[in-house]
Image: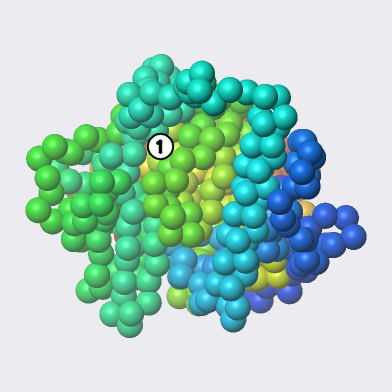
Amino acid sequence: MSTENEGTEHPPAPSAPPVPVDTPAAPAPAAQHGPAGDPAGQQPHPAGPAPAGDWPPPPPAVPAYASGGAGHAPGDGGGSWGGGQNHWGAGYQPPQPKQGGRRGLLAGVVAAALIAGAVGGGIGYWAAERGDDAGTGSTTVSASNPADLKRDPGTVAAIAAKALPSTVTIEAEGNSGEGGTGTGFVYDKEGHILTNNHVVAEAVDGGKLSATFSNGKKYDAEVIGHAQGYDVAVIKLKNAPDNLRPLTLGNSDKVAVGDSTIAIGAPFGLSNTVTTGIVSAKDRPVASSDGSGNSKASYMSALQTDASINPGNSGGPLLDGNGNVIGINSAIQSAPSGGLGGSGQSGSIGLGFAIPINQAKMVAEQLIKTGEPLYPVIGASVSLEEGTGGAKITEQGASGAAAVTPNGPAAKAGLKPGDVITKLDDTVIDSGPTLIGQIWTHKPGDTVKLTYTRDGKDHTVDVTLGERKGDS
């Protein structure tokens, strides 16, 4: 599966992701919400009380807002993944109201009221025809207070109730006034919040940053460290409260396909939203970007989930069935058409990707300790082109540098330009991004076994990974 970034001809070494080239999104067809014969759901549907004696009452009319009157937010950019778009979720901006949009909503409310009236009238007539005696006393049964209802441990409701107070909605604003909304979660009792780099990128150089808890309390925050290649960042609350409850971190290496997942975030700015799904794949090679000219790609060997994830979910926790964090929601695969209802921003199609928490924890600890990321490297530049049968070492590196760093890990192992790396340990390598994502799941100093092809013959060598500090 391709993870190629469009427009990149000469990728840098695996530790330095290529700068993506923004690709204009193709226009999308209008959303199809209406019934057959009324594709957009815009034909009038009369509503009114049921005729006397009619029971059950006629089916309710389709409200005026069935055609998607709420609109869709503009996109936050995207990089290429598998021929589609990976959209990060930080760039949500409130949509501008459409002309007549409020009127359509009001019409929908009126229609709903008429429907309710029709149902009520039908019930009243039915009761009168039966000859029920109103003097025999009420037959209604009051439900208990919803707040008093108990949720069994392990249910989605119980897990959400425990996790929501430790999840925050992040607002980042740059000096130019641009910014967006994302999500994060409490990492420790000292006030550190774990999130995506692209969520807070606008506020890194002197911008404004805040985190709002589910109870509405808002705190100013600052960026402690960020890793663009990993798409991980750590921020810290200013004047953090004493009662912070860090979320429990799970073990992403032990996750199995089919395990239950729960995602928490602020899709399209709607804070404290909970969605559910399963782990639909593991070790999915993903290269994603916000599409801006100065943004480098991020690479991950991701957890794939069908839990609904949209722009604004980025940086939020992906939980397992026990409420433990197994990943950080980071990217989505959007439909090639480019959006719902003809807009440029696509929503969830059931393909969301999360950074495994084992990797994110390793990066977070490094950022808290030193403020800058540390990347493992092999000291070789690989092609991101399709059809190479693996990760092919290029003839020349970025900016005219050597494709194989002299005296680096790959050089010491005997690798040369033109070699095609096909396996790392037991993992099949089908492309450059797959190799990068797999390397970045390790630490500098780890020894990995690389299998490569040269002149039609397979060779296997051990490579001790080097290191590179910072995003450069």
Residue for point 60% across, 78% down: 100
Q: Nearer the viewer, residue 441 or 234?
A: 234
The reply to whether residue 130 is in sight is yes
The reply to whether residue 72 is in sight is no
Q: In the rendered structure, which amino acid carries the disc numbered 1? A: Ile
Which quadrant: the C terminus? bottom left
Residue for point 24% across, 70% down: 208
Give left or right: position of 268 versus 42: left
Instruction: Determine whether 179 is above or below 348 in the image.
Output: below
Residue 258 in the image: x percent, y percent?
61, 25
Q: Which residue is mark 1?
A: 357
Residue 355 in the image: x percent, y percent?
46, 43
Residue for point 61% across, 27% down: 257
Give left or right: position of 84 versus 74: right
Residue 193 in the image: x percent, y percent?
26, 48
Residue 389 in the image: x percent, y percent?
74, 48
Residue for point 66% across, 43% down: 121
